[in-house]
Amino acid sequence: MGEKADVVVVGGGVIGVCSAYYLAKLGRSVILVEGDEVGKGCSYANAGLITPSHAMPIPAPGVIKQACKWMLHEDSPLLFRPRLDWGLVSWLIRFAGHCREKAVNRSIPVLRDLSRASLGLFEELVSAEGLSFEFERRGLLSVYPTEQGFEKGKREASLLTRHGFQPQILDGKQVRELEPSVRDGLVGGVYYQEDAHGDCHRFVAGMSAASQKLGVMIRTHTRVTRIVPQGASHVSLLTENGEYSGRALVLATGSWTPQLAKDLRVNIPLQPGKGYSVTVDRPPVSPTIPVMNAGRKVIITPLGNRLRFAGTMEFAGLDLTPSETRSHAVVRGGLEVMAPLGSLQNLERWCGLRPCTPDGLPVIDRIPRYPQICISTGHAMLGYTLGPITGKLVAEMIAGRPPSMDINALRIGRF
């Protein structure tokens, strides 16, 4: 007969684990099903940022033009690999339609409010659950090696200021005073003091342990083969290891969501964006504040006794094959703005797929045809940042409670 619970959560990344935790806090019995180990997907070695300041959606004026210039460069910050895929073509058409100032100004307040609410929940969780994942609120320092880049950074800071942020514009000397590990000669920087950072994999592991204490049953190495809705108040999940069923289901499978959602006759325009990271032993001279080389879209994050270089975006479908060139580009982009760090030791290379919608906003909603099924995906580079608030919103939705904040902009129907 398989296992039963009030809610079955599919996906053991930050979104799924946070959803399971908050559902359990509301008194629901929960089974979480994960095809691999918990936290081994794009939660494993991402940049580690918790960033309200990243409220700018991916589609923005000038992005398409810049992407076309980068198309032939394997090491570019943004790379679209051409392929015969109508889903990609359709997604790009929608994406281009959102690369407008009006769309950006609609999206920024949504991402800002979600991110700030989530940051508050991170602090609550650290206190309530005693989580240890190198969490620190030291802000984020974006630096610019060129005048052209700095001018662009100041324009973006000005836009975010109009939406309630308080970025600090710094000249090259002030950048060095704030973070002495960066190299001499940088033109300037923008400091977003509101941001935080921490090890996402350790956070997910901690939340998994906290969830199990609340009664959540976690089933790893359990690949889903089919979702079978039964009426409007029950759903079965068929897996390679048996059947799981519940009164509700949460689909939090990131870039793989559209594949599973086909069974449900719902189309979510989603493209996987591959990000890279290289983590090394922390050198004697290294940043204490996360530093972003804004021109290269590379972030250098201190995580305890390790230092992580992360960034770039590569659209190549559901392909986790790493590119050595792009991996090297991430490290090179970080070293470009840092003082000499010496020989990098104990390198760990990684890549993961971020689920990207064409408007840059996540999807958190019930499926209209099957109201007992909630889909939560499309967080792009903000999956870690938005994990706690997404989990809380999902739990409220499943429990029939009023949402903590307005989620109309996150509905499936917008597509």
Image: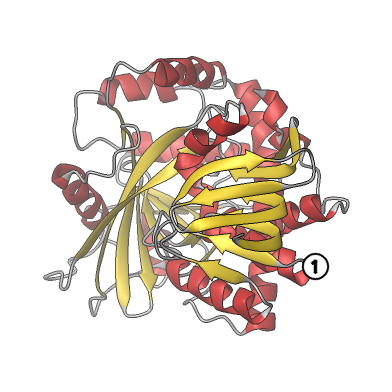
Answer yes or no: is residue 311 visible.
yes
Residue under circle 1? 26
Amino acid type for the residue under numbered disc 1: Leu
User: Along the line of sight, which residue is nearer the eye, 312 or 65?
Assistant: 312
Question: Which image quadrant is residue 413 in?
Answer: top right
Q: Position of residue 51 (x, y in %)?
A: 55, 55
Answer yes or no: is residue 194 visible.
no
Label 1 Cα neighbours within 10 Å, binned few <14 / some 14-19 / many ≥20: few
Q: Residue at x 38, y 73 (%)?
A: 303
- Vertical arrangement, residue 405 with respect to residue 281, above or below: above
With 54 as the anchor, is 399 left or right in this view?
A: right
User: Along the line of sight, which residue is nearer the eye, 93 or 391?
Assistant: 391
Farthest residue, direction bottom? 130
- Vertical arrangement, residue 123 with respect to residue 33, above or below: below
Q: Residue at x 24, y 80 (%)?
A: 284
User: Along the line of sight, which residue is nearer the eye, 219 or 38?
Assistant: 219
* Callout 1: SS: loop
